[in-house]
Amino acid sequence: MHSISYLIRAKEIQDFAAQFYEPGRHDKCYKQVWLKHVFPKYGFNYDTFLRYMRVDTSCLEELLVEQE
């Protein structure tokens, strides 16, 4: 189980990717999304970006409600 802040950050990263990623286009692949949008804001490497993309954030809303 990940911490809430980790899940929030993972959700933000996944939202960036969903907004800018287009399959089949090399100028909008995951590496370019990381390079142009994620790296300048968060400053972590590409492997970390891919790790955040694999995180299951479906339980985030439940955790936030429980915390309140």
Image: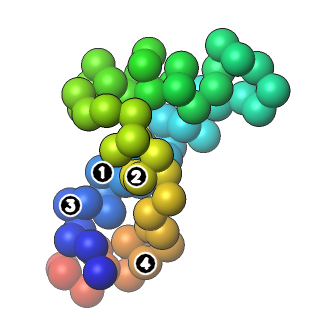
| Badge 1 or badge 2: first in the primary sequence | 1
In which quadrant of the rendered image does the C terminus lie?
bottom left
Residue located beneath label 1 in the image = 9
In which quadrant of the rendered image does the N terminus lie?
bottom left
Q: Verify CB contact (< 8 Å) between mark 1 and mark 2.
A: yes
Of 57 and 29, the residue lying toward us: 29
> Residue at the location (49% across, 35% down)?
16
What is the spatial separation of the Cα atoms under label 2 and label 3, in whole angstroms?
12 Å
> Residue at the location (19% across, 81% down)?
67
From the viewer's perspective, is residue 44 above or below residue 62? above
Residue 7 image offset from top left, x and y in percent? 32, 63
> Residue at the location (44% across, 63% down)?
55
Q: Verify CB contact (< 8 Å) between mark 1 and mark 3.
A: yes
- Kind of residue at disc 1: Arg
Residue located beneath label 3 in the image = 5
Residue located beneath label 4 in the image = 59
What is the spatial separation of the Cα atoms under label 1 and label 3, in whole angstroms?
6 Å
From the viewer's perspective, is residue 51 above or below residue 65? above
Can residue 15 be seen by looking at this rendering?
yes
Quick one: which residue is furthest to the bottom in this view? 66
- Mark 1 or mark 2: which is in front? 2
- Mark 2 or mark 3: which is in front? 2
| Badge 1 or badge 4: first in the primary sequence | 1
Residue located beneath label 2 in the image = 52
Horizontal relation, residue 15 to residue 26: left or right: left
- Kind of residue at disc 2: Tyr
What is the spatial separation of the Cα atoms under label 1 and label 4, in whole angstroms?
14 Å
Residue 29 image offset from top left, x and y in percent? 64, 26
